[in-house]
Image: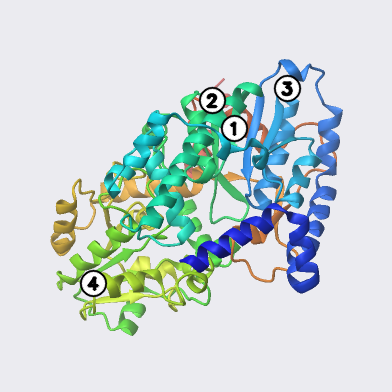
Amino acid sequence: MKKIVLKKSLVKLVRRYWPLRMFAWMLIRPKRFLQEFVYPLSDYERFKNSVSIYQKYLADSKPDYDPSEKPGLLIIAGIMGTSWCQLWSVLAGAYKNKMYKTFVLTSRSEPIQNLYFRLFDIERIYIEDLNIESVNLSASLVNTINSLEGFENIKNFEEGDSPIGKMALSTFSRMQATGIMDIDDSKSLAEIKNWMFYLCKAKRVAAALYEDKNISTLFFTEVFMDYYGGFYYGALRAGLNIMRFNGTVRDEAVVVTHQTLKNDRTHFSSISDESWADIVSRPFNESVEEELRQNFEDRYSDRWALSKRNQPNTNTVTAQQAKSELEISSDRKVAIIYSHILYDTLFFNGEYLFKNYADWLVQSIKSACRNPHVDWYVKIHPSNLWRGELEQYNEGIYEEVRLIGEHVGELPEHVKLIYPDTPYSPYTWLQIADYGVTVTGTSGIELGALGKAVVTGGTGRYENIGFTISPRTQHEYLETLENIHRHPLPSSHQNELGKRFAYATFCMKPFTLDFFKPIPKRGKSRIYATDDLVFIGNFENEMNSYPESISGFLDWSLNKSEVDFLNPWPTDLEQEIGNENHECIDSLSV
C-alpha cells in the first residue's frame, strides 16, 4: 500500500509539472517521449487540419454580440482523454455561435489536450489555480466528518443533499483499484475522510465559479468522484443545465443526457419515465427486430474497436456447440453471474442491495454454491484484459479470483469461472445462459432482449421495466438465487419489453458523431483504452449550416426538460410502403 501511495504521489508531481515530465521522458524513456508528446502533437495537427472547414463556417457566421452579457458554457474536462476534448471543443464552437461564452475547467498537466480548446478560443480555467484545498469549512462540518465511524455512517453521509460519503468511497475505491474497503484501517479511513473534505470544498469553489462566470450550461462525463463530484453537485443544486456525456461500444457514438434532480442517480443509459411511456406506446415492428439483430451482430463482430477489445481471440458458436464442448448436459439449466468492474463508479447508479460490487459478488457466489440444481458460471469482467490494474495492483491475480479465495474457498463442481481469455464470444455465453445475474449491468439488457431471465441486485437502470426478477432485500435476493431453477423463463410480453428497452438503449440513445471519423492514435496498433481512438473532422467541403447531427444536438441541449437524447422510433418498412400506396390511391380518387 505504501509503495502504491508513494508511486501515485510521484506521478501526480510529474503530471503537474509537464515540462519536467517531457524532459524526463526525452532523456530516459525516448519511447515514452514519443507516446506522451510527439504522437499526441501529430494527432493534434491532423485534427486541426481536418476541422478547418468547420472553423471557417463558424468564423463566417459569427454573431455580433457583447459576450459580457451572455450566459456561459463550462466544460468540466479535467484530465479527460483526447477524444472528449475534440468533441467538446467542436460543440463549444457551435455554442459560441449561439451567443454563449465558453470556458473549460482543465489542468495545466495536460498541455497538448489544452491545444484543442485553444483551437476554438475557449477560455481555460485551471483546476490547480482554484486552490480547492485552501477552502475553509465550518468547524461543525469538520467535526461531524471527523466523528463519523463505520462503513454505513460514512456511506450515507450527505452535505446539503450531496452524497459526499458515497463519492468519497467511490473515489477511494477507484484510486486503490479494489472493491474491498477496509474502514477499520486507520490510514484508509483518513484518506476517505480527506476525500470527503475535498469534495465539500470543491462544491463551494464550483458555486463561486458558476456565479463569477455566469455559467448556465455544463458538459460533464465524470460526475461522482474526485473534484468532478463537487462540481457536479454544485451545478445540480443550482438548477443549471447539465449534460452528461458517456462513451459507448461504438467508436463513433456517445450517449448524452440532461441530469436533473429526478434522474440524478440513474444510469446514463436508463430511460426517463416520459420517454419510456412513449416507447411502449409505439408499434413493435419488424424494423425494430431487424435493427436490434444487426446491433447485436455489430457489437460482437470486428466493426467497432471499442467492443472488440472486450472479446479478443473469441469465436461465436451456437449454444448447442458450446454446451457440447463444455460438457453441459442438455437437461441442465445454466445461470451466469456477470461480475462488474469491482472498484469503478461505485454507488452512483441507484442503490445496491449489498455493501458494494465485491460484497454482492461474494454473496451471489455463495448462494450459487448452495444451489446445485443448475450449472453456474461466474464471468470475470473482460476489462481486466486491457485496463492494466491486473499487473499494476493485483500481482497478476484477478480481483474476482482473490475475493473467491478469501471469502468463498474452493468452488463446488457445479460452479465454474469464465475467464476473460475464454475462446467463446460474449454473445455465445449470452446464448448459453438461461438465467443471468447482475446488479445493473449491460448484460441484463442483452439477456432480456434474448428472452432470458435476469436477476438484479440493485436499482437505477431497468429494474422497473418489467422483464427482470428484481428482489427488494438481501434475503429475497439470496433466496431467489438458491431457487433460481424454480423461476419460469420470461413470457412473450416480458421478452418484448426487454427488446424494446434494448432497442432504446442500443439504437435510440447513441448520438452518432457523423461529423467525425474515429482513427487510432499515432503509435497505436491495437485499441485497448477509450483514448486509444481519436477523431478527425468529417465535414463537407463547403458548409452553409451546421451538420444536421450538431443542429439536432443543439436543439435538444437547450431544452433541459427533455432528459433523453433519442433517435426516433422506426417506422416499419411495410407500413411506409402501405402509407405511400394509400397516398397514391387518395390522389387518384381526387
Under mark 3, the amino acid is: Met
Q: Is residue 285 visible?
A: no
Q: Earlier in the sequence, mark 4 or mark 2?
A: 2
Image mark for residue 292: none
Answer left or right for 508 relative to 347.
right
Q: How far from the left and from the top, in percent, is residue 25?
A: 76, 67
Label 4 with label 3: CB-CB less than 8 Å? no
Q: Earlier in the sequence, mark 4 or mark 3?
A: 3
Real-space CA distance between mark 4 and mark 2, rounded to the nearest whole angstrom: 47 Å
Which residue is under mark 3? 99
Q: How far from the left and from the top, in percent, is residue 395?
A: 46, 76
* Residue 122, picture quadrant: top right
Q: Is residue 115 visible?
A: yes
Which residue is under mark 1? 218
Under mark 2, the amino acid is: Leu
Q: Residue at x 36, y 41 (%)?
A: 146
Which residue is under mark 4? 408
Under mark 1, the amino acid is: Leu
Q: Earlier in the sequence, mark 3 or mark 1?
A: 3
Label 4 with label 2: CB-CB less than 8 Å? no
Q: Residues within 10 Å of mark 3 (few under 14, many from 20)?
A: some
Q: Nearer the viewer, mark 3 or mark 1?
A: 1
Which residue is under mark 2? 240
